[in-house]
Structures are given as structure tokens and as C-alpha cells.
Amino acid sequence: MAAPKVAVVGAGLIGLSTALCLAEALPSCCVAVLSEQFSPSTTSDVAAGMLIPHTYPGTPIHVQKQWFKETFTYLFAISNSAEASEAGIHLVSGWQVFKNPPKDEVPFWSDIVLGFRPMSAAELQKFPQHRSGQAFTTLKCDCPPYLLWLEKRLKASGVQMHTRKVADLWELHSEYDIVVNCAGIGAHQLVGDQQLVPIRGQVLKVHAPWVKNFIRDGDGSTYIYPGIHSVTLGGTREKGSWCLSPDPGTTKDIFDRCCSLEPSLQQAQDIKVKVGLRPSRLCVRLQREVLNRGGAKLLVVHNYGHGAGGFSVHRGTAKEATRLVGECIATLQGSSSRAKL
Amino acid sequence: MRVAVIGAGVIGLSTALCIHDRFQPLVPCLQLEVYADRFTPHTTSDGAAGLWQPYLSDRGALQETLWNKETFDHLLGHLGSPEAKEMGLFPISGYNLFTQPVPDPSWKNIVLGFRSLTPKELELFPGYSYGWFNTALVLECRSYLPWLTNRLAQRGVKFFHRKVESFQEMFAQGVDVVINCTGVRAGELQPDPALQPARGQVIKVLAPWVKHFIITHDMESGIYNSPYVIPGSEFTVLGGIYQHGNWNEENSAQDHKTIWEKCCKLLPALQKAKIVQEWSGLRPARPSVRLERETIRHGHSQAEVIHNYGHGGFGITIHWGCAMAAARLFGSILQEKQLARPP
């Protein structure tokens, strides 16, 4: 049969990284990325891009750990290469501090990040309101640079990118054999997934280049993540809110909470406010589906619903989605040989 | 009582501030002056990256270890204050790398979170088989010296931009005590064969993705003759030159090549960094810091000099402990002159 035509819907982190995995693993395919938004206007562009996993209640821990390990290993190699600055990948060390004892003293990902250990009493003195903490070194993917780097690698691999709003996956059935649905929060409307809910996050991106370490409150609500050109201060977790406009009261609240963790942030300049809707689900929807209409078929692979943890697992879920696309291709080839008999 | 501080690097300015704040309330007639032929940004201190880190071995000078600790604790105490940014002070984590296991340094319990590197961390640094991780501080002199200068000016301390040729010159104009913070050129005021320049050269680049300091060590070539990378608030400093006895303050193309190639090998991501500036300076190297009183005959009377120089490549690291020690020596001078009661 002719080269399978694969459309990836969505050009955020998940769409672009999945498309790249496809181009690398299945060079016989013709891959295109279709999206209404591209960087810098995706949800991924708002996120700090820290590799600190979010735990999905609906996915076995060993699977999440495997995804995180694959992602960390992949990015670790890039961070140590000449491409690091262009790709926006860099190591960052810091502290996760707790007012109350954490549920997991030793999280499942502690042996994947570097140098994980409890904080010493001397280190905790810097955080008088917190009673315990963890110190470690992890990776950060700055966006837009990482997304732009993925786009560049995709173009070099012959992957076409089209700005196009897809209102219904079925509209692609005449042009493509397989559709990979990486629409993120857009899947709520695109495929009518009621289990997918937005968790609104507001962040500030500020100029404070003397901040070299990350600080995160273990309750997940307050964090300071130093990036290449700005420091991301966060945040909020507003379940069910679809509002994309920044709220000034929230801005002040985030700033105050972060300054209480790191007083030098009072001198931060050039404060920009951003909002993103985390595409949240009990588990990432990573599965195949066959759409049938009047005898015609469209093979779909879903890869969405990464919520607060997209960056931490993106390469792992992209590889799994690629494997599922491989299964789809085998199905297509199977039916096409049967058709010849 | 007139006190002249000679030298306006980190040692001179911090010693002046320490003496003023401790004794001006007790001795209202205290008049402090700072003399220097070079002020910020043209002092040796200005070229330093500003990382707080002593040498690996304390050279048997336990007092220096104590002064290092006093400096670290003093700076740590300023971290949460609104002054920190203006001072050029911020915490930073990073790596010390070795080609063989080494004993822990004297300062392991002074810095925060000191530990050995894990095997996975060492994968980042091919060619190095052992290392340390810790959190320390950076104090950038291009901010700290102006901060000290402002504080001194606010307190009415006068500054004189001129080269002092001798201690006698100061005494002849009525100065009672000279604080000698002249760094590498102290030998011009009083010969000191133990004091030698240890020339360094650095390249300043734009590499804001580098968030850690990385200091490599080659036990054979000696301290700071092995590549190092130290991020600042705006630029990242690349270095690794330590030339004992070299007085040349001009940049060397050969040293540039050495620094650039070795640092890019250490951190491949640096290949894309934009070079912004090159700088050379002379560390005032001495087997130990000269921090002591000397009584000098001046005509029919005696005048006092407090020496505070010879801080090598660890001036910022040790400066506050030395400033306080110099202030204590000053206190004993005041007591002898019955100008101040013992505290």
C-alpha cells in the first residue's frame, strides 16, 4: 500500500513530540501536524516546563515512572549537547518544601531526578514557615524555545505543518489514514470527552535573573521556576474554570506567596501574566479507536489529558502513541492484503 | 582621630565600613578616609566572578577557615533582606569536579547541603570521576562595591582618588592610623617577598541557561588552572587561569583559547554562548593573609598601620571575617590611646 498518511491534531508539546516520534520511528509514513494554534499560543507555552511529575490517579505507578524515565533520559542528553540552549533545555537545582509532612516521603520519581535527598536543617532555615523539604536537580524545558526546536526538527524530517481548525476528526477521513488526537484541552469539544476538565492556572513570568534555584511548596500551589529568560511564578489550580483572562487579584496573590518564599523577588521587573488550562483527566487517554461511518473507517490514536504533568511524561507518551500508530498501520496493511486476495 | 584606608577593593571598602560602624558611635572624633588609585569597576575585585568558595585545603591556617565561615554566615543573613539584589548577592548551587577521590574540604559544613556526586551526575562530566555538590553564594563586586561605597558616603566617609606613595605621606598629613588594603601592589608601600601576583583571565559570556557553577580541579596543575564556569546575575564567567609571578594585566590570546576550548568541552552548550567581555587581573597571592598591626616610627611619635592584604583568589570569600578582625585590631589601638573603653 502507499505510504500511510498520518495527521497529528494539535501543535502543543504533545502534538509536536508525538509527530517527531512518528517521523523518527516510522519513516515510511507521511506525517502532517494540523493545529489551530502554534507556539507561542499553546497551553504548553504558559507552563514552566519543569520535570517534576504529577501523579495520575488512573495510571499504574510503574507506567508513569517509565514515561518519566524515558522523558528525563531523552532531555538529559539534549541538555548536555551543543543544542541545549536552542532547545531551551537546562538543568536546575532547588528545593521542594513542606509545611505539613508529605503523603509520600520518597516520591516514585526520586531515583530518576539527580541527587534527591532530604533537606538539611541549615537549608530549611531559609524557609522558616516550612518544616521539611527535599533537594534535587531536575530539567526544565523552556517554551517557546523547546516547541520551536521541535518544529524545526519536524520540518527537517519532512513533516508539514498546517494552521487549521479541526472541528470534527471525521473531516480528515478522506485525506488521512490515521489521526493522532493530541488536542489537549481542545479534546473536550473535538471528541466530546466529558472526563476532560480544565484546571486553570495563572502564572507570572518575571525578570529576576539572580534567581538560580527553583523553590516549590509541596502543596503544589506556590512555585518559583527559573528559566532561561524569565522566572515563572505560580500559581493556581482552578478546577472547571474555562477563563483565559488574567485576574489582577490572583496576580497579586501569586506574587505575595512567591515573595514570601523568596523575598528577593520583590525586586523582580517586567512582570507578564499568563493563563493556561491544564487538560486534566484521571489518566492520560492513550488508546486506539476506530471511527466508522457508513462503511468508511478512520483509525484514531488518542494522546491527550496530561493535565499538570505533560512535560514530565511527554516523550514516554509520544513513544506509546507511536507504538499504537504502528499497530494501526499493521491493521491497514492487513486489510489491504486481504483486499487483494 | 584620622584613619586612612588605602585601597578600594572589596577588602578596603568592607574594612572601612566595619571600622566605621563599630567605632564611630564610641569615638565621635573618628574621621575615616579612603584613598585609592583605582575604584570600582577597575579594581581586582570587580573582575572576580564572586563565588564564595575557599581553596580546597586550608593550608593550615585555621583562622582563615574561621574568617571564611564568618563571611558566609554574614552574607547568608543578608539573603532575605531587601538589600540582597542591590548588594549583588544570591544563592547558587553547583559542582566541584575531580579526576580522583579527594578528602572533604574544610568548608563542607559552612556551605549548604554539601554532598558527593552520584554516578548519574558524573555522567554529565566525562573525564571526571569524583565530585561534590553544594549550595553557596555569589557576591558580585560590580554591585557590592558600589553598595559599600554608598553606605560609606552616607556615613560621611571621604574618598580620595590618588595613588599613595608611602605610609609616611599619610602620617605627614596628620593621619593617625593607616589601614593597608592595597592588595597585589602592597609591595610598593612596603616590600613583601611573600606577596606575588597570581594572574587570572576570564571570558564573560551570555549563557542564561547555565544555572550552576562548575569548578574543575586538576591536582597537578593547581588551583584555578583548570576550567570553571560561574553564572552571574547577567553574564556567565568562564575561567581557569592561575599564573604565579605574572604581572601582565593584558588579555592573552593563548589564555583565551585555553579557557574557551576547555570550558566548551566541559559544557558543550557553551558553544552557542555569545562572548561579551574579556578581563585579566592579578590575585594578591600569599602563603597566608597578612592581617596584623605594625607600629611605625614617624618623627618623634609612633603611628599605626593595620595590614589587611594577600587574599589570593578568595578575597570575596574571606572579606568580612578579615574586616572584623582588622576592626578588632583597630579597637586595641583605640584602647591603648585610651580613646575607647573595652566593650
Image (cartoon, coloured by chain):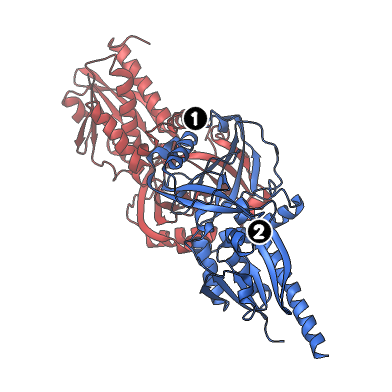
Residue identifier under label 1: B69
Q: Is residue A160 left or right of residue B80?
A: right
Distance of mark 2 from mark 1, alpha carbons?
A: 60 Å
**In the structure shown, which secondary structural element does the residue marked by tag 1 occupy?**
helix
The local crowd at label 2, few if under 14, some if 14 to 19, many if 20 or more residues have their Cα within 10 Å, is some
Give coordinates of residue A52: x percent, y percent. Answer: 62, 49
Instruction: Determine the colour of chain A.
Output: blue
Q: Residue at x 52, y 32 (%)?
A: A126
Question: Foreground: A161 or A62?
Answer: A161
| Labels 2 and 1 in the same subunit | no
Instruction: Report the disc number at residue A193.
Output: 2
Give coordinates of residue A50: x percent, y percent. Answer: 57, 51
Q: Amino acid at mark 1?
A: Lys
Q: Amino acid at mark 2?
A: Asp
Residue farthest toward the left in the current orientation of the protein: B173
* Chain assignment, label 2: A
Question: Hey, which quadrant is residue B186 in on the image?
Answer: top left
Q: Residue at x 36, y 25 (%)?
A: B326
Instruction: Determine the colour of chain B.
Output: red
